[in-house]
């Protein structure tokens, strides 16, 4: 089974890094979609299905908080796991994201195996593609 | 240098560079001549009292190497957009790491920026005090913390 993945980050470099990390960790991706902020992501998701969203928090135009809140308000992607890949340091703000329905978060800088491990849990997979053990912020 | 933030910033810069940019640096004492550096990036930690700016200045060769490492491409394929984007991300991660270690939930991260330092900014003998770091024995960059209270923002 392969997954359609949406990466939301204002940094083109980080989108590339995340994309490459997913490919290297053996995560089976059908289609990669990319957006540079929450608003672009909302526009992209209008009428499209994705299996997983990886999003930054601090972005211009629309940040990660407003993005996930908008998804909830519009009843979009309500069963789609959303993992935040972020430099956010505040535990309070990260807990707010989990309360809004985020599946977890990974702090930057990250090691590739952290993404693999997080995704294996979030997607309900076995350890088939997970090569590491360190995972932060998983609310399971 | 403030003895409290210096080791924290060293630790954060080392962690970010090693984890995401596959690069190890050594820190040195002393001032740096501004003309040494061709690129700058900065992120602010903000609260109602003011802002703490973390500024990085690096040499072009070092910036190119970092960008190539981050993206997994050859240095010759690094373009200007990639380079400045990677430097913004470097500042972003250093700012986030510093915030996490200082354990101050009152602060929030701003949006990072990066720029090419113009020749006019680097003429003269002006020096700056900050953390100097090098890579493989060569000077690579400097990191400076600057607090600006609200009335001066």
Image (cartoon, coloured by chain):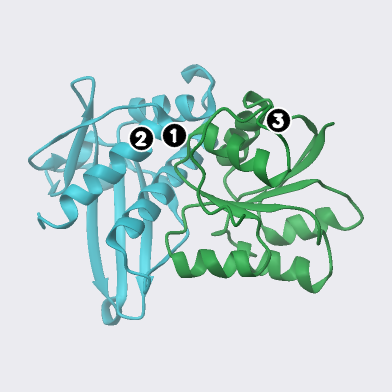
Chain colours: A green, B cyan
Residue A110 seen by the camera: yes
Horizontal side of residue A27 vs B95, given as left or right:
right
Q: Are marks 1 and 3 on the same chain?
A: no
Q: Nearer the viewer, residue A44 or B115?
A: A44
Q: Could you tell me which secondary element the residue under label 2 belongs to?
A: helix
Secondary structure of the residue carrying numbered label 1: helix
Q: Pinpoint residue B84: horizontal percent, then vertical percent.
A: 47, 40
User: Which residue does the numbered mark 3 point to in the structure image?
Assistant: A27
Along the viewing direction, whichever of B117 and A67 lies nearer the viewer: A67
- Crowd rating for badge 1 (residues with CA inside 10 Å; few <14, some 14–19, many 20+): many
Disc 2 is attached to a residue of which chain?
Answer: B
User: Would residue A82 appear left or right of B93 to someone viewing this image?
Assistant: right
Indicate the secondary structure of the residue bearing disc 3. loop
How far separated are the C-alphas under marks 1 and 3? Answer: 20 Å
For the N terminus of chain B, give its image quadrant.
bottom left
Residues at discs 1 and 3 in contact (Cβ within 8 Å): no
Residue beneath the point at 80% across and 46% down: A51
Give the foreground label among 1 and 3: 3
Labels 3 and 2 within one chain: no
The reply to whether label 2 and label 1 mark residues of one chain is: yes
Q: Give the answer, above or below, for where B68 lies relative to B152.
A: above
Q: Tell me residue A107's x, y (percent).
A: 48, 49
* Chain of the residue that carries numbered disc 1 in the rendered image: B
| Residue identifier under label 1 | B20
Q: CA distance from mark 2 to mark 1?
A: 6 Å
Cβ atoms at labels 2 and 1 below 8 Å apart = yes
Q: Which residue is mark 2?
A: B17
Label 3 – label 2 distance at C-alpha: 25 Å
């Amino acid at each position: 089974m392969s997954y359609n993945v949406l990466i939301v980050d204002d940094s083109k470099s980080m989108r590339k890094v995340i994309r490459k990390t997913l490919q290297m960790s053996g995560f089976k991706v059908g289609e990669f979609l990319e957006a540079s902020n929450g608003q672009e992501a909302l526009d992209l998701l209008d009428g499209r299905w994705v299996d997983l969203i990886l999003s930054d928090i601090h972005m211009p135009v629309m940040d990660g908080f407003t993005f996930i809140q908008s998804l909830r308000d519009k009843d979009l992607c309500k069963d789609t796991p959303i993992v935040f890949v972020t430099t956010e340091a505040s535990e309070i703000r990260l807990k707010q994201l989990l309360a809004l329905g985020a599946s977890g978060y990974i702090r930057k800088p990250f090691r590739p195996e952290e993404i693999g491990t997080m995704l294996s849990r979030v997607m309900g997979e076995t350890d088939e593609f997970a090569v590491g053990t360190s995972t932060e912020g998983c609310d399971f | 240098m403030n003895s409290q933030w210096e080791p924290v910033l060293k630790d954060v810069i080392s962690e970010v560079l090693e984890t995401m940019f596959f690069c190890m640096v050594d820190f040195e004492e002393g001032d740096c001549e501004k003309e040494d550096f061709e690129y700058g990036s900065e992120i602010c930690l903000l609260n109602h009292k003011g802002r703490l700016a973390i500024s990085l200045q690096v040499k072009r060769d070092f910036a190119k190497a970092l960008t190539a490492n981050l993206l997994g491409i050859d240095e010759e394929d690094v373009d200007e957009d990639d380079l400045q984007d990677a430097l913004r991300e470097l500042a972003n991660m250093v700012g986030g790491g510093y915030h996490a270690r200082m354990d101050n939930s009152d602060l929030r991260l701003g949006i990072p920026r990066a720029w090419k330092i113009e020749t006019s900014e680097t003429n003269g003998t002006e020096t700056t005090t900050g953390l100097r770091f090098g890579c493989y024995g060569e000077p690579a960059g400097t990191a400076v913390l600057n607090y600006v209270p609200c009335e001066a923002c």
